[in-house]
Image: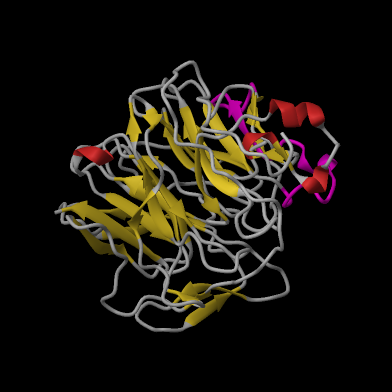
């Protein structure tokens, strides 16, 4: 489809004919703008804002770039602390709690911290380094008697028993992964299959739109499937620019991902998205985007792949940096939230006005998205240049509350129904 043309509605990515939210009507590519946010930290006593009927409290503070979380079988919360390392220059990445100023770091914390709430009061009373000396860790998984962590350059596996508060040794590297990446595309996520027989690995692109040559994008912008020992690697889906959040729709074998789309085509291009992932599917990057619209920077290169591009299920707004993804498989929240998707939007830099910087909710019905995204956790933006923090990972807890990792504010927020 030529750029600027519109298409009504959207097509489900499987045999279910339930109507999905309409695909967005997109403008032609335009001027690229930049507005970087300045993180000022959270004033004492201030929290993000949730809808009426919910309470927001601080779960943990004084972390260093808490970006992703994983809940162990016994309820322990494991937090990956890591950031984008920039050699030769310091970078404002962490905020001193209780002060309105930034602390500067030039190295990633490279650790996983364990938080345990032993008395069930909604706040951890045990905090311990679970494992350190990692290399930009992100995705975590407990499967069988092993704990897995995805560094930016590979997957490590450690022996693990439920309730363990720290890991010993340096782990076994079971899989090499292409390291680093454009902007924040160093993150590698992990998701176990429902039957425990496979592991899914997300790897973002190494560039915005393949501008360094596609020979540098081998095994990138994709979700891979491997065996628990690292063998049996196969491409599950590709053309996914930066597929960070991954989750199974509750009670199903339908994989969903939240994708951080491309930059420098204008304020409203290209929308990030939530989509079910079709095995063997191609989702456009870098040659095309929504409705098989060809990216002008790759014009005429791969018409076969443009034609093959699958339209995602739900548009999440351009430049929102939609990274976190979790389905609400608990029952404490009101019925409308049951089995719906929460998405952490880290926030824009390539847009005239800020977008993202919040957690949005996408309702589901009969196993399919049934409405457009709606704001759930807001209040991260202070004014037109400053933000208090930036949300990323979203994780339901066994007690029915959810946690939100605020990597720039160095806190984890807990949202519970009142």
**Residue 27 appears in the figure:** yes
Residue 296 percent coordinates (x, y): 79, 47
Reply yes or no: does residue 354 show up in magenta: no
Q: Residue at x 55, y 35 (%)?
A: 312
Q: Quadrant of the C terminus?
A: bottom left
Q: Nearer the viewer, residue 202 or 157?
A: 202
Which span of residues is magenta-colored?
206-232
Q: Residue at x 41, y 23 (%)?
A: 18
Here the colouring is: secondary structure
Reply yes or no: does residue 208 show up in magenta: yes
Q: Nearer the viewer, residue 94 or 46?
A: 46
Query: Overall secondary structure of the magenta stretch?
Result: loop
**Residue 68 appears in the figure:** no
Residue 211 percent coordinates (x, y): 81, 51
Q: Quadrant of residue 62?
A: bottom left
Q: Quadrant of residue 338?
A: top left
Left or right: where does residue 74 sit relative to residue 374?
left
């Amino acid at each position: 489809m030529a750029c600027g043309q519109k298409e009504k509605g959207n097509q489900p990515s499987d045999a279910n004919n339930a109507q999905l939210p309409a695909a967005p009507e997109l403008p032609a590519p335009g001027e690229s703008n930049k507005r970087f946010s300045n993180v000022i930290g959270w004033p004492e006593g201030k929290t993000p804002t949730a809808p009426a009927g919910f309470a927001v409290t601080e779960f943990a503070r004084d972390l260093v770039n808490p970006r992703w979380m994983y809940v162990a079988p016994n309820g322990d919360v494991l937090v990956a602390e890591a950031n984008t390392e920039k050699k030769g220059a310091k970078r404002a990445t962490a905020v001193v709690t209780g002060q309105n100023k930034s602390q500067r770091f030039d190295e990633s914390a490279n650790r996983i911290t364990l938080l345990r709430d032993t008395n069930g009061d909604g706040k951890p009373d045990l905090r311990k380094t679970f494992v350190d000396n990692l290399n930009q860790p992100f995705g975590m998984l407990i499967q069988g008697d092993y704990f897995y962590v995805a560094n930016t350059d590979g997957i490590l596996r450690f022996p693990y028993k439920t309730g363990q508060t720290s890991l010993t040794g340096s782990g076994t590297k079971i899989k090499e992964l292409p390291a680093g990446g454009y902007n924040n595309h160093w993150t590698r996520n992990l998701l176990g299959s429902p039957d425990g027989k496979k592991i899914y690995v997300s790897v973002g692109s190494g560039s915005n739109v393949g501008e360094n040559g596609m020979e540098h994008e081998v095994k990138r912008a994709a979700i891979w499937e491997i065996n628990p020992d690292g063998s049996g690697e196969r491409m599950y889906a590709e053309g996914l620019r930066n597929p960070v959040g991954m989750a199974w729709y509750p009670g199903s074998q339908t994989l969903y991902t939240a994708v951080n789309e491309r930059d420098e085509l204008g304020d409203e291009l290209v929308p990030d998205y939530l989509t079910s992932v079709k095995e063997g599917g191609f989702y456009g990057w870098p040659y095309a985007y929504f409705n098989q619209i060809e990216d002008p920077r790759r014009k005429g290169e791969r018409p076969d792949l443009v034609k093959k591009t699958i339209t995602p299920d739900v548009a999440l707004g351009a430049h929102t940096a939609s990274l976190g993804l979790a389905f609400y498989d608990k029952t404490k929240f009101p019925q409308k939230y049951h089995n719906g998707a929460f998405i952490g939007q880290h926030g824009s830099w390539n847009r005239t006005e800020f977008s993202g910087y919040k957690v949005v909710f996408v309702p589901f019905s009969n196993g399919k998205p049934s409405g457009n995204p709606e704001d759930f956790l807001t209040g991260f933006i202070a004014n037109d240049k400053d933000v208090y923090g930036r949300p990323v990972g979203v994780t339901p807890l066994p007690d029915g509350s959810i946690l939100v990792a605020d990597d720039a504010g160095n806190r984890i927020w807990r949202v519970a129904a009142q």
